[in-house]
Image (tube, helix red, strand yellow):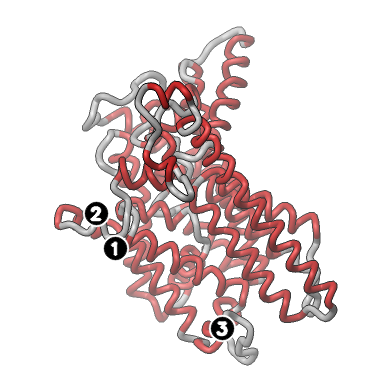
Amino acid sequence: MKKIILSIILFRIIYISYSLILGEFFEDYDSSGPKKGIFSNLARWDSIYFLRISKYKYENEQSFAFYPLYPILINQTSKFISFLQQNLPFSFEFLENPEFLAGVLISNLSNILAAILMFKLTLHLSKNEKFSVISTLMFCLSPANIFMTVIYTESQFALFTFAGIYFLNTSEKNTGNSGRNFFRYLLSIICFMLSGATRSNGMINAGFILFDSLHRFKIARKITDFLVIIFQSLFAVVLIMIPNIVYQFYAYKQFCLSEFIKNTTGVPSWCNNTIPSIYGYVQNHYWNVGFLNYYTFLQIPNFLLAFPIVLISLLGIFYSWKKDFFNVLTIGFFPDKNSDFQFFTSKNVLVHTFHLLFLTLFGLFIMHVQVITRFLSSSSPFIYWFAAEVVMNPKFRKFSLFLIAYFLIFSFVGPLLFTNFYPWT
């Protein structure tokens, strides 16, 4: 385990250095971005929003497209860095912009921890160390690698999502018992709640809790067991939704209840909706996010960029489902116990195929399709499990070459484009 952790840390240091070097040696496509301090090259595109929110909070409607936990952590970490700067007898260039350093530290520490959890989760489910190592390696070489390195939420979201899944799976006491280790179950809920405070799709992680509860019903024996499962499920879902509720209420109070806004620009239209949601309004009004809104000829290049991760996701789902489709139709209640394909047909892995399919279809038909690579890569460990299966299985030799080439090209070309402000978002 120590070797694996050291390897993960070493790779992260090398990748950060590689990204910084590319940012310094090539001229920016757009020179309007921040250029102060060595980490400014890692502050591009959405990073600017996160940094501004961390410093000035939510100044306008557009800024509410970004959830608050990551900017809050940047703000608090930068204050600690500033404290160190004031008390150190010497100064470093990278301390000139503590917010930049804070964001990079949070993202990369989160990435390291997410990779460790990826290994532990995979080993727990598969009981196969080689498969776990290769899955973790594929995560470290993620096609969304640059977004897990810069001042973006991808690494933090992956950390909380993977942690929630890991604690949920390890909370199972033993086969035939519907009970859960309360501490690990609570940790799972807290991690999913933090993922919901990081990005909007964190709320979808409540599905893991509900799926687990359905399977607990199957082995519950007493009426009290059923009542406990129902109570725990409702408690978990409410907690996971709380960050979004608080976030939406904060916006409602700022824009819909403000006398100043009422007397100047007037109350925004979204305030009058049955369920007033600033997030949905901002995504649609300012970014044109909506069903099939991105299906235009001008967006064909972005669909081509998204094609590999969509193909890999759908092939992985099909690979899992075709082995025991009856098990899929019964959502894992009746697996084929004689199958030699236990990992990909187990209920604890099957749920990830449902999760990934939902995210893939949502990304394809509603979101800006160019972000689907980082959207899926930071949300689902199943992508890396299937990637490891492809690499290890001789039947996939030709496809494995495509998959490895895709991971490497996106992983190592991404820093060149992102750090120099080319359209790689």
- Location of residue 136 by image quarter: bottom right
Foreground residue among 207 and 326? 207
Q: Earlier in the sequence, mark 1 or mark 2?
A: 2
Q: Is disc 3 in contact with disc 1, using a CB cutoff of under 8 Å?
A: no
Q: Quadrant of the N terminus?
A: bottom right
Q: Quadrant of the C terminus?
A: top left
The total number of labels drawn is: 3
Residue at 61% x, 86% y is: 335
Q: Of 84 and 178, which appears nearest the observer?
A: 178
Q: Which image quadrant for residue 177?
A: bottom right
3 vs 2, front mark: 2
**Quarter-wise, where is residue 234 in the image?**
bottom right
- Between the C-alphas of marks 3 and 1, the distance is 28 Å
| Image x and y of residue 153, in percent | 48, 42
Asked whether, in this view, residue 228 is left or right of residue 347, the answer is right
Crowd tier of the residue under label 2, counting other residues whose Cα lies within 10 Å: few below 14, some 14–19, many 20 or above: some
Q: Residue 351: x, y in percent?
A: 56, 71
What residue did someone put label 3 on? 341
**Label 3: which secondary element:** loop
Query: Three-letter amino acid code at disc 3?
Result: Phe
Mark 1, residue position: 307
Of the residues under marks 3 and 1, which one precedes in the sequence?
1
* Outermost left residue: 297
